[in-house]
Amino acid sequence: MILQIENKTSSALQVISQPAIPKLPDTTSSSLPLLQNRWTCEMCEVRVSSELTLQSHLRGKRHRAEAKLWCDFCNLRVSGEIDMIAHLKGKRHLAKLQEAFASAGAL
């Protein structure tokens, strides 16, 4: 959009350019994605209202007590099969295994 404003001190015209206003996206309720308002720990069947609260629950005694799987090498309890698989593929676990096999080979 270009506006022309007459300069009061002289007869010349001064041209001022202003940026065009960008078109805003449609914000009707049907166009907005649904926001998650509940977080759930499936293992403990606990529902909380924020991600921060869920993270706190996952670090808590009740959640850890529900954990069923144990890694003897790392002295670690995990809450489910997916977590155990991730742990078994992880750097710390593999390093402990390597250390255990190295010390067993030294005997």
Image (cartoon, helix red, strand yellow):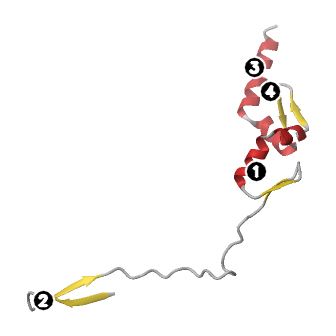
Tell me the element at label 1: helix
Q: Residue at x 78, y 46 (%)?
A: 57
Q: Position of residue 58 (x, y in %)?
A: 78, 44
First reached walking from the N terminus: tag 2 or tag 3: 2
Amino acid type for the residue under numbered disc 4? Cys
Q: Residue tagged by mark 3? A: 99
Viewer-closest of 2 and 50: 50
First reached walking from the N terminus: tag 1 or tag 3: 1
Q: Residue tagged by mark 2? A: 8
First reached walking from the N terminus: tag 1 or tag 4: 1
Q: Is residue 68 left or right of residue 13?
A: right
Q: Position of residue 72 (x, y in %)?
A: 86, 26
Up-down relation of residue 29 to residue 54 (above or below)? below
First reached walking from the N terminus: tag 2 or tag 1: 2
Q: Is residue 33 left or right of residue 100?
A: left
Tell me the element at label 4: loop
Q: Residue tagged by mark 1? A: 54
- Mark 3 vs mark 4, foreground winner is 4
Q: Position of residue 46 (x, y in %)?
A: 85, 53
- Mark 2 vs mark 3, foreground winner is 2
Residue positioned most to the top: 107
Up-down relation of residue 55 to residue 3 (above or below)? above
